[in-house]
Amino acid sequence: MPLDLSADEGENDGEIGAIIIPIDSIKKHDSTSFWRFVGRTRLNMNTIILSYWADGGESSFTGTGSFDLTAIYQKEKIKFENNFRSAAGFQVFQHSGPKKTNDKLDFSSVLGYQFTKKWFYSINADFSTQYFKGYTYPNDSVVVSEFLAPGYLTVSLGFEFKPLKMLSLYGSPMAGRLTFVNNQSLANAGKYGVAPAIKDEDGNIVVPGKRMKSELGISIIAKYKGKLNKSIDMNSKLMLYNNYVDPDKSNRWNIDISWETWFDITLNKFFVASAYFHLIYDHNITVPVYDFIDDKRTKVGETIHLQLKQNYGLGIAFKF
């Protein structure tokens, strides 16, 4: 199972120092059961304590937890796979407020019917959002995300090709996607691609911004899960989406990209090193641009840009 260490704005990439507690398999107790469950949970903790430290700094505590569960039903030509991934983490400072470093809620479900040795008819559903409010630090007064703001639901009908046990390719020419922005201030600003509020000449809102956006397009998903060698496990998921009915015809050639890759490196019986990478490009999501003005980091605008997140860990592993 993958290690999911996603984070909102203000994330501390490259954090090292973790206690990792994976659950790699839960055995079937009934040989007649067609269900199989695989789960993993992790807890990362990092503490810094400073007392009369001349070089400066601030005492802090960082805690991050994640939980992954896969439930697979397989009987003859029918396969039903469900994946749940959840993560939450905060960094608490001695003299300043806490910051969210990790926040993710994902659920995906695939129902497939095998019609040849390597091909399946498939119905695919994906849902993702976050639990808590997020901010673009150091500004912790303006909310930029919260539960269902944004939230994404994609339902598609297509074909899955499995040339190898560890590799699958899924394509759908009919993939419907809903984007939820359940925060009226964000909706009024047109965040995450929803229609913004209509204002009069004095800046008063005449028509509130839409809280939901619907799309219909093409979805392609590539997944790899297997061992690179005896010690290294790799799990990678690439998701591509194109909205071919976008009212703005100039956007119909834009492709949304989400590519996550996890590496788990077993060092010995107890210790595991891990690395996580997440690359995102979405023309509906803007990111802040900063500049130093009078020696102070100041937001000067927003732009559409390739987003990259990295996280590294080294810790103790327990398997059962």
Image: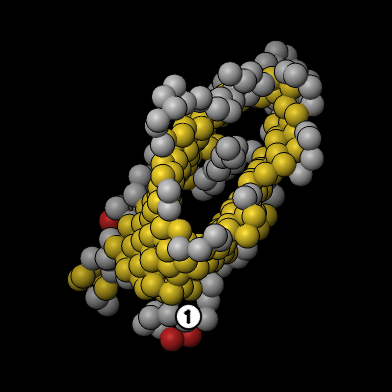
Residue at which label 1 appears: 251
Front residue of this view, candidates 112 and 101 = 112
Residue at 56% across, 61% down: 118
Residue 190 placed where, x, y %? 37, 66
**Disc 1 crowd, CA 10 A, few/some/many (<14, 14-19, 20+):** some
Name the image quarter holding the N terminus.
Answer: top right
Front residue of this view, candidates 185 and 296 = 185
Residue at 43% across, 86% down: 249
Q: Tell me where residue 238 sits by quadrant.
A: bottom right
- The residue lying furthest to the left in this view is 206
Residue 180 placed where, x, y %? 33, 57
Give the side of residue 107 with respect to residue 11, left or right: left
Name the image quarter holding the C terminus.
Answer: top right
Residue at 78% across, 33% down: 231
Where disc 1 sits, the SS reads helix
Front residue of this view, candidates 23 and 149 = 23
Name the residue type under label 1.
Asn
Give the side of residue 41 with respect to residue 183, left or right: right
- The residue lying furthest to the top in this view is 51
Residue 70 placed where, x, y %? 47, 38
Residue at 39% across, 79% down: 246
Q: Is residue 204 above or below residue 244?
A: above
Q: Answer whether residue 90 is visible to the viewer in this image.
A: no
Residue 310 placed where, x, y %? 67, 45
